[in-house]
Amino acid sequence: MAKRVLVGRPVRSDSLGHTLLPKRLALPVFASDALSSVAYAPDEILLTLSIAGLTGMFVAPWVGLMVVAVLLVVVTSYRQNVHAYPSGGGDYEVATTNLGPTAGLGVASALLVDYVLTVAVSVSSAAQYASSAVPALRGHEAIAGVLVVAGLALMNMRGVKELGRVFAVMTYCYMGVIGALAVTGFVRFLMGTLPKAASAEFEITTEAAFDQGLVGLGGAFLVARAFASGCAALTGVEAISNGVPAFRRPKSRNAATTLMLLGGISSTMIMAILLLAQATGVKFAEDPHTQLTVDGAAVPESYNQHPVVGQLAEAVFAGFPVAFLAVSAVTGIILVLAANTAFNGFPVLGSILAKDGYLPRQLHTRGDRLAYSNGIIALAAAAMVLILVFDAEATRLIQLYIVGVFVSFTLSQSGMLRHWTRELRTEYRPAERARMMRARAVNAVGLLFTGVVLVIVLVTKFTHGAWITLLAMAGLFLMMRAIRKHYDDVGDQLAIVGSEDEGQLRALPSRVHAIVLVSKVHKPTLRALAYARATRPSTLEAVTVGVDPDDVEGLVAAWERQDLSVPLRVLDSPFREITRPLLKYVRSIRRESPRDLVVVYIPEYVVGHWWEQLLHNQSALILKSRLLYTPGVVVSSVPWQLESTAGQTGLEGAYVPGQRRLP
Amino acid sequence: MAKRVLVGRPVRSDSLGHTLLPKRLALPVFASDALSSVAYAPDEILLTLSIAGLTGMFVAPWVGLMVVAVLLVVVTSYRQNVHAYPSGGGDYEVATTNLGPTAGLGVASALLVDYVLTVAVSVSSAAQYASSAVPALRGHEAIAGVLVVAGLALMNMRGVKELGRVFAVMTYCYMGVIGALAVTGFVRFLMGTLPKAASAEFEITTEAAFDQGLVGLGGAFLVARAFASGCAALTGVEAISNGVPAFRRPKSRNAATTLMLLGGISSTMIMAILLLAQATGVKFAEDPHTQLTVDGAAVPESYNQHPVVGQLAEAVFAGFPVAFLAVSAVTGIILVLAANTAFNGFPVLGSILAKDGYLPRQLHTRGDRLAYSNGIIALAAAAMVLILVFDAEATRLIQLYIVGVFVSFTLSQSGMLRHWTRELRTEYRPAERARMMRARAVNAVGLLFTGVVLVIVLVTKFTHGAWITLLAMAGLFLMMRAIRKHYDDVGDQLAIVGSEDEGQLRALPSRVHAIVLVSKVHKPTLRALAYARATRPSTLEAVTVGVDPDDVEGLVAAWERQDLSVPLRVLDSPFREITRPLLKYVRSIRRESPRDLVVVYIPEYVVGHWWEQLLHNQSALILKSRLLYTPGVVVSSVPWQLESTAGQTGLEGAYVPGQRRLP
């Protein structure tokens, strides 16, 4: 998944083997997404539970434990995936192979949507870390987020070299910082010198429905919702299963080990943060100014609620304000890096889908910058819209998140169940059978857990925003199916079926009529005439469309002066347009001799700057596109390279969509 | 100017004579712009003077008289223009012919900017009339204005038939309504039964600087600014001078008579409104809630300040609330129609400028919808930006307005002065000389007046927003000069100069290498092969780029099965891209035999829907554009019409920019 980031570009196909990752590099590269969610998942748990007041806060570590349990089950399950499907196709491949293309497409839609949300959530969370450390940013989080996404998109479009090293350094920094926080906090707690958090003095207003504590259906629902939000910590686990080919040999075993490391580190971090939050008395509310009170009055307007990790850093490293800034900075950066992994995963998945005919084919061509650019632009645009619409509020975005990931998890696990069942049918060695049975049991437990979480996520978050995700997934699913159907239809149309087809297609046109389009007598026209003549057509004539009588007169006079021995035909244009008379003339030739071929030579200017393009060839462009509707017509562009193209070969520069230097 | 609106489309060039306008139709068609400014010009005079309190209000009719004087002088001057330049080129032609292309380009820049402002000011004013009549619209004027502009743009892009009749009916309605208002008001004033306006009871807070009344430099400046704003009533006069060719014979005389009628009606309306405003005691302020008080207290927040015409209608037709709504509605519509005239004038001027090489040539082709569409989109986009940025506040937009018109007036009048001086040099008949001397005197007075007004406008409005207009004009001016220079440069490059040039250009390439691009063995490929073969090239080979080894293997096998007797060359693509290897191969052929011609045949799909285009041919598109950089290469598109093109001939439909169905 993050392979491209590491290997740089361009890379010869045969040199891919050189860039395999040792575990110490693979962990940080693939883990930033999963580990970064520690920066917001505990916050979401606390924030949701805060509705139930202080009782809620005390439940938080137990919810965290549930999240950790699911995380460990999912990690264990994916260790099976990694062994069984080491090709890097990930959940899409597992679902397609075992459950069929519809399930595969479902996984793909879910993952595409979730990549967008990964960017939106991570960047929004990063913006909140930034604005908590730099108060001047407050109120401008959305704009800051959009700028960060734009920066990521640009960076990825231009190609990022050596970012692997940055990933590694930053991820280890992050682990170090959170580790130091946890250890220092734990030691001070044991020594009884752990200070209280700044927000410990606040009272939480319990919502009326929960003034009896977390009892009944309402209480269960709230805990379930907190759990569902906390499960955001699980995103990014699938990254390793997509990245197996980038590991050093033995690939699958190294990937599985890395997965286990990731699960362990992630679990430890979440639990450490939730326990420390309880020990320091951190209060965290969705809207601190209405939910939190101090001495019976609302907290002052100026109160700036730091993220939980920030509050812990303030408390644990009390007296060292630099520590708070360092923790915020490192966390913000790791969140941006997490967003960046989506910029690698999204185009790669897009490319795989394009190869399978579900997305426009131009997304496939590997190694062509344009292919990735389109994916990057689509991802960035969608994420920017989300950030703006939700005003960079991670809490609201998280309601849309992880639906996709858990759809993908669940389909993938049931795919694995099928996989093992099928494998078992042809396997008779007892030791192997036992191993497969064990693997199947693991995936069955995985399916059970991920399925239950999916249901919980859907039930608790549907009205909070998950419906948007489902709608987007359904839209993508239908669009991709329609595209595939289109390609299939076209394929059927183009296939050479019978010998009748072939005979007709191989029959040579009896004669070739060459038409050279003339607007002025100048060098490009003479070149087009010479080239047309070089192909020795049966007939050759120059054609012009008479829009302005004076122009036509001047053209005819110039033509006669040049003595070109090619007849110039002037087409009448009563409506002062160019395309229609010419089209009609070409069609009249075709009608008279349907077995002949008409070749229309169009002199074109080739320009050196994109803006010059706007000043030339627009009529030619339209004319060409319309001529192609007539069967039996070939449109030949005869280029004339203007001086501004000096030194250009057509090989240089990236072709960004929308900037195509069309001839 | 509004010719196209009246004549409908398409019109044969030779049928233009049939659609000439009698005066009774020409007046409303050309007058809506000029007459509609009566809906806001008096408001601006009152509003500016209100800064000086009640004293200011009493000066208003005198300022109105000054505006009328200038209006009549300008109308008289333009009667000379109309006689001397009946071709409809307007100020641009007058300035270019008499003062040279730089002055002409200056006029053109000024007019283009002013067309944009005509739309922005008229639509903003219309939105204010609408929100004064329909309070629900209040606060949403900018959005309403943008929607109206979008509607106008769409209407004009699709072509408007029979709008001439609407113009005529609505303009006469408007004249009738304002006329009835004036006559009723005057009669009731004489009878002593004219009621006071609702705002008559308000006191105006005089700004500290003017508590001594309108004395000294400050007072003079304020009056000058009110006058400059009132001169907005003069915009639209030039419309008739651009429209002479649309008049019935004797064209110039009829146009001159219409101009006089327009001047008379416009003057009467302005004076009637200003006098009635004084008689009914209308108070009008830029910010009524701070400037107006009633019984010493600020007017209530709910007070909705109607435009002056609306307030007069309320007062004069007191007891008939329907009259107020009718006046507001008719005025709003006439303002939108005024904006619509700019949608006709802007593209026509753009087309003239394009013909002269100052704008991209594709804006010129008359009768091609695309030509006008680009102009319409540019105008609409610019006007929308202005409306949004200035929040549809006509008062602020008017500070930017009329700078352009008066630049154009002034240059045109000095052009006319030159014109007569030159004519007089060759004219010896005393009667004619006397007539010309008179005409020159008229234009000299016109130059004096318009020049003075231009200076006043620049001095009083520069810091209020006129600098934006000047900046935009300068930007357009420089851009158009750069475009002209580019076209001139290209023209020099392309001109056939010596016999050496010719000999080289006429020399036929010695051999033709045909290359057919192959990605799959399917019908389009077979057709491309057959067509290439039909041109009997010296050599013919099929070329494919090997990106995926499996694909190549399959292709080669299919190729051999088909037994096509054409060699298939597989180009190596170590970086998994298509364009570069092919380009290198073509260049290598050119290097080996520089005198030969390479024709690259590219099979292309022709699709029936624009969205299908996104799914096909993207690689071909890029490839084609890059191949054209290599001299001696012809790129031939061999179309394959997919079934979705059934029934399409390439002749149907408008080609909106950005929606080009590229092959």
Image (spheres, coloured by chain):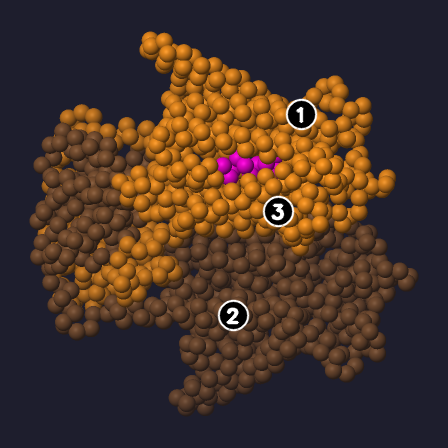
Chain colours: A orange, B brown
* Membership of A34 in magenta stretch: yes
Q: Position of residue B109 (x, y in %)?
A: 49, 69
- The residue under the point 12% across, 68% down is B503
Magenta highlight range: A31-42
Drawn side of residue A171 relative to residue B518, left or right? right
Q: Is residue A77 left or right of residue A181?
A: left
Quarter of the image with the N terminus of chain A in it: top left
Q: Nearer the viewer, residue A486 or A629?
A: A486
Q: CA distance from mark 2 to mark 3?
A: 49 Å
- Residue at image position (80%, 34%) is A205
Residue linked to disc 2: B473
- The circle on residue A591 is none
Reading the image, the residue beneath label 3 is A328
Instruction: Identify which amino acid the numbered label 3 is placed on.
Output: Ser
Image height check: is B385 above or below A373? Answer: below
Asked if badge 1 and badge 2 are on a common chain, one would say: no
Would you say A93 lies left or right of A602 here?
right
Query: Considering depth in this image, is A292 or B658 the residue closer to the camera?
Result: A292
Q: From where the camera sits, is residue B206 visible?
A: yes
Q: Amino acid at mark 1?
A: Trp
State which chain disc 3 sits on: A
* Mark 2 or 3: the one toward you: 3
Q: Amino acid at mark 2?
A: Met
Which residue is pictured at 74% across the width and 61% down the height? B308
**Comes first in the chain, label 1 or label 3:** 1
Residue at which label 1 appears: A62
Note whether A455 is above or below B166 in the view shown: above
